[in-house]
Image (spheres, rainbow, N blue to C red):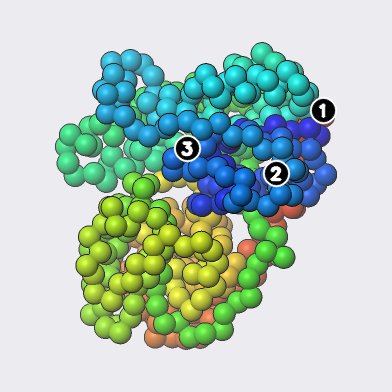
C-alpha cells in the first residue's frame, strides 16, 4: 500500500517515547513492503536536520518537514480562554504546513493516511478533500485524560482551575475528532476502553509499541547497584511524578540503603527540579538511551498522570532491567506484578520494592530475565504491524 504518515514531530532523531513510537510504525510498514511518505511538523523542541539521520531513512520515507512555533504564548493562551478552541491543538495548525500537505496530496495518490496523534487532526478536512483512501488516527494517548489527572494532582487553585479548563476544552475537541476518522489505532486496551466510553463508533485497533529482536541489547548480568530514571522534564506528568519520588520515596530508600545512588537522564532537569538530593547524579540528556538502560540499575516509573503506554518501560524490560512503577506507568503492558515488574502506588510500597531488589540479587535477576522474555514474546514490532495492516485491509477492502 501507499501510505502517508503525518507526524506532529520528526520520528528521527528519536528523542522521546513519542518519536520512537512513530518510528516503530514507519519501520514496521517499510519492513512489510509498503511505500511510506512522511510529512512532519518540526519545532524548537523537536527540530529537524537531515544531517542527524541516515540517508537511507530519508530516501525510503521521502520525509518533508515544516517548522512551526508551537511554544506556549501567554497572549494567545489568554485569547483562547475567550474562544471555544482547544489551545493545546490550535498551536499545531498553520497554513504553511497545510500548503505543503496539499502539494503532496496533489502529486501522489495514497491508499491510507495515518494521523499520528490528536495534534494533527486540524488537517483532516484537507486530507478528506484530496484523498479518497481511509484515514486513521494513531492515538498515542487519551489526551484530555492527561490534563484531567494533572489538574487533580495540582495543589495551587488557580493553576488547577486552568488545567481543568484546558482538559474540558481538549475533551470536547477529542470527542468530536473521534467521530471524523474511519478508524482509531489505540496504543493500549485501556485507551480503547476510554475511546468507547467517549462514544467512538468506528473500528478501534490496538497497536502497542514494538521492538525487533535484532534491536534488543545484550542483557547485563551485573549486580544491581543503582536506581535510574529516564524522562524529559519539559512534560508536566514527568515533573510531577519525579517530584513525588524525590520528596516521598527516595528518603525512605536512603534510610535503609544509604549507599544507593539515583541517576537521572533526560532533558531540562536543571529548569524544573531542585536536584540537591543525597546520592543523586544528573546525567542530563543522553545521546543513546540504551547506554543507561543496558546497565546494572533498577528503573523507576513514578507516574501519577498520563495515558497511553510508557515506551521506556518496554525498552527497560527488553534490556532485562527490573522495573518499579506505579499502576499508571505500566498501563498497556499486561505483564504480572512480581514476575515481570513491581507495581507500587504509595511511597512506602514503592521504596520497599526498590529495597527488595537491592537486597535480593536473585529476584532482580529473575525479574529482568522474565521481563526480557515477555517483551520478545508480546512486542514484536513487525508482527504487530502486519496484524494491524491485515485488519485494515479487511475492514476497508484494500
Find the distance from the CA under tag 1 to the CA under tag 2.
Answer: 30 Å
Look at the picture and state if 328 lies above or below 319. above
Find the distance from the CA under tag 1 to the CA under tag 3.
Answer: 37 Å
Q: Quadrant of residue 100?
A: top right
Q: Residue at x 83, y 44 (%)?
A: 33
Picture coordinates of residue 30 (x, y %)? Answer: 77, 45
Point out the tag, 1 or 2, that comes first from the N-terminus: 2
Q: Residue at x 45, y 75 (%)?
A: 297
Helix, strand, or loop for circle 3?
A: loop
The residue singled out by tag 3 in the image is: 43
Asked whether residue 196 is in view, the answer is: no
The residue singled out by tag 2 in the image is: 58
Point out the tag, 2 or 3, that comes first from the N-terminus: 3
Q: Looking at the figure, which quarter contains the C terminus?
A: top right
Helix, strand, or loop for circle 1?
A: loop
As drawn, the label of residue 397 is 1
Q: Are marks 2 and 3 in contact (CB under 8 Å)?
A: no
Q: Which label sits in the foreground, 1 or 2?
A: 2
Amino acid at each position: 500500500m501507499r501510505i502517508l504518515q503525518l507526524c506532529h514531530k520528526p520520528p528521527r532523531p528519536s528523542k522521546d517515547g513519542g518519536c520512537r513510537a512513530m518510528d516503530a510504525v514507519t519501520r514496521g510498514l517499510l519492513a512489510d513492503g509498503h511505500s511510506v511518505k512522511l510529512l512532519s511538523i518540526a519545532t524548537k523542541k523537536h527540530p529537524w536536520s537531515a544531517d542527524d539521520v541516515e540517508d537511507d531513512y530519508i530516501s525510503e520515507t521521502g520525509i518533508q518537514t515544516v517548522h512551526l512555533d508551537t511554544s506556549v504564548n501567554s497572549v494567545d493562551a489568554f485569547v483562547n480562554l475567550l474562544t471555544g478552541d482547544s489551545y493545546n491543538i490550535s498551536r499545531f495548525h498553520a497554513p504553511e504546513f497545510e500548503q505543503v500537505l496539499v502539494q503532496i496530496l496533489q502529486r501522489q495518490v495514497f491508499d491510507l493516511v495515518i494521523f499520528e496523534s490528536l495534534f494533527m487532526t486540524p488537517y483532516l478536512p484537507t486530507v478528506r478533500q484530496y484523498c479518497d483512501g481511509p484515514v486513521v488516527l494513531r492515538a498515542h494517548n487519551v489526551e484530555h485524560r492527561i490534563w484531567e489527572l494533572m489538574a487533580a494532582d495540582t495543589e495551587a487553585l488557580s493553576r488547577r482551575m486552568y488545567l481543568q479548563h484546558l482538559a474540558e476544552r481538549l475533551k470536547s475537541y477529542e470527542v468530536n475528532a473521534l467521530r471524523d476518522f474511519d478508524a482509531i489505532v489505540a496504543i493500549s486496551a485501556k485507551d480503547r476502553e476510554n475511546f468507547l466510553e467517549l462514544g467512538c463508533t468506528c473500528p478501534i485497533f490496538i497497536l502497542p509499541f514494538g521492538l525487533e529482536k535484532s534491536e534488543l541489547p545484550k542483557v547485563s548480568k551485573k549486580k544491581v547497584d543503582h536506581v535510574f530514571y529516564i524522562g524529559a522534564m519539559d512534560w508536566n506528568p514527568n515533573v510531577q511524578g519525579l517530584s513525588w519520588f524525590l520528596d516521598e520515596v527516595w528518603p525512605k530508600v536512603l534510610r535503609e540503603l544509604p549507599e544507593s545512588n539515583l541517576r537521572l537522564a533526560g532533558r531540562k532537569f536543571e529548569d524544573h527540579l531542585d536536584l540537591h538530593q543525597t546520592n543523586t547524579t544528573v546525567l542530563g540528556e543522553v545521546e543513546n538511551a540504551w547506554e543507561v538502560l543496558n546497565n546494572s540499575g533498577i528503573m523507576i516509573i513514578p507516574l501519577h498522570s498520563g495515558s497511553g503506554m510508557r515506551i521506556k518501560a518496554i525498552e527497560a524490560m527488553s534490556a532485562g532491567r527490573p522495573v518499579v512503577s506505579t499502576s499508571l506507568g505500566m498501563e498497556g503492558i499486561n505483564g504480572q506484578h512480581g514476575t515481570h515488574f513491581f507495581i507500587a502506588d504509595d511511597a512506602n510500597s514503592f521504596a520497599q520494592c526498590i529495597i527488595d531488589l537491592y537486597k535480593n540479587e536473585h529476584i532482580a535477576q529473575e525479574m529482568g530475565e522474565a521481563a526480557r522474555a515477555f517483551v520478545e514474546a508480546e512486542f514484536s514490532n513487525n508482527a504487530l504491524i502486519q496484524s494491524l495492516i491485515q485488519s485494515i485491509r479487511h475492514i476497508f477492502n484494500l
